Amino acid sequence: MRLVECVPNFSEGRNTGVIDAITTTITGTDGAHLLDVDPGKDTNRTVVTFVAEYDAAVEAAFRAISRASELIDMSKHTGAHPRMGATDVCPFIPVAGVTMQDCAELARRLGRRVGDELGIPVYLYEEAATSPERRNLANIRSGEYEGLPEKLRDPHWKPDFGPAEFSSRTARTGATVIGARKFLIAYNVNLNTRSKKIAHDIAMTIREAGRSKRDDEGKFVRDHKGEVVKETGTLKACKAVGWYIDEYKRAQISINLTDFDVTPPHVAFDEVVRQAEKIGVRVTGSELVGLIPLEAMLRAGRHYLEKAGVSTGVPEEVLVETAIQSLGLRDVAPFDPKQKIIEYRVATPTPLADMTVRSFVDITSTDSPVPGGGSVSALMASMSSALASMVANLTVDKKGYKTAQAEMKRVAPKAQELKAVFLRAVDEDSRAFDAVMAAMRLPDKTDEERRFREGTMDKATKGAIEVPLGVLERCLDVLPLLESVAVKGNVNSLSDAGVAALALRSAAGGAFLNVLINLPGITDAAYVGERSRRARSVLDEVQRRCDQVTVGVISRLEEPLRGEKLTKPAKSAK
């Protein structure tokens, strides 16, 4: 899943008809999911948040900007918030499976379209900026809409895209700032006190900007220029203030984490706990404002499991619940991960993977074409990964396996990640088959219809090849995990390691067959040759190494039958 968040700000916060017309363009874009619409009457501004698949992000944003340019007249706009265009600012933010560089490229693609097709001056900012002085939004927006005519005449402020003139068109639309930035997590930590002063004191201690330094007499310390010296806070990429919330009858530290790769929520939470304990105050929990990326929750879950000295190789749901409980995210309000975690809000349904075992087997046994061999192969691969994780977890903290601990603690979480990948492929294979069937049903009476049908069939058939090929290639990632648990894992689970190898061998073989059966539907000989050679090479390696694991497991399991003692592998693998 490649997800991008986009947060366009529109210069209209009072006319609900205009706001609805703009947001409808987003909901009408395939692959885009509208998450939040926050209008402000005083600011006369609406902040819209949507998440989209990578390729759909630019289209959804462009449609919204285009509609705003038709409905909002900046020459008549007034509001408390700084602004310079009908669509004032439009940042892309990486969420899952994309990099900041990817988002910067999206910003450039959107900027070019807005400038060329809509005739709107566009400036790029933050990670997409074309010069250092354009990184800061405030610099670009200086002078606001009223200063735009003069800015456009200044060669130094020539737009990155679009016209460098204040025409009648520009008078209506203003200019738009488009860019790429980090995800911002709005996060509050709750205290067992009503004292705003205490909360704000902790906030100044942790925030990156810190506080003004004072001497022993309480006076501000100044440098040689007469400016007040600052004491840097304990957390980077962190903004914070303290306040009192009457609804909760307690004080909170309100935190904005501007880069959760630098300071994630669990680090901020632990630091607040540490600072609060110094002054005899307790942290009772925390509160998430808005949404959070799944990765931030998974990191928190792993962090607290590691602190407890237990394996982090557990299902994703366990990691998320561990994070929720450890951070006290249900302290003052309900916390539903399906509503608060971005990826869960926009997740594609997985009806096959969510079935009971009995239901899956039953529907497979009917004349329904799905689930078929591709889905079953993916399921077998997920079961192989699950067994690898199980053996590793049964080895962690077990007496006699001291030398294997570090390796098993690496194996278990990696196996869990692969298990999740294969489970998603169970339904991806089904959807790929449905796409082929849908393409086959397209009309082909005219030349135009035939060309469209052939193109759609080709794309759908390649999808039906790439899904099982992806499963086959990811089987390579499982191999070292199986080899590890079969040699160093708990001997009482040795048979489970063997079953995992057998399941992976079958999964790879099944995926290979599903690649082969679809290749004849492709007319591109180069594509067919490359995919068939690749698939055969991977299959040979998976089968060879799985056979080695299986032979080794059988040999060791037969040791007691030969009167030999089955030794713990950790002792022989020092």
Image (cartoon, grey):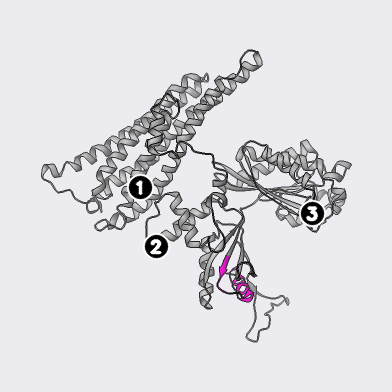
- Mark 3: which amino acid? Asn
Residue 446 in the figure: left or right of residue 171: left
Q: What's drawn in magenta, residue-wise?
A: 189-207
| Residues tagged 3 and 2 counted as in contact (Cβ below 8 A) | no
Q: Which residue is mark 2?
A: 308
Q: Which residue is mark 1?
A: 389
Residue depicted at x 69% and y 77%:
223
Find residue 409 and report its horizontal and vertical position in percent: 36, 53
- Mark 2: which amino acid? Ala
Q: Quadrant of residue 65?
A: top right
- Mark 1: which amino acid? Ser
Residue 154 in the figure: left or right of residue 459: right
| Residues tagged 2 and 1 counted as in contact (Cβ below 8 A) | no
Mark 3 vs mark 1: give the one in front: 3
Real-space Cα distance between discs 3 and 2?
Answer: 49 Å
Q: Is residue 122 above or below residue 544?
A: below
SS at mark 1 in the image: helix
Residue 456 visible (yes or no) = yes
Q: Is residue 530 above or below residue 414?
A: above
Find residue 310 and report its horizontal and vertical position in percent: 37, 58
The mark nearer the N terminus, 3 or 2, is 3
Front residue of 288 and 52 = 288
Find residue 174 and report its horizontal and vertical position in percent: 82, 47
Q: Which residue is mark 3?
A: 44
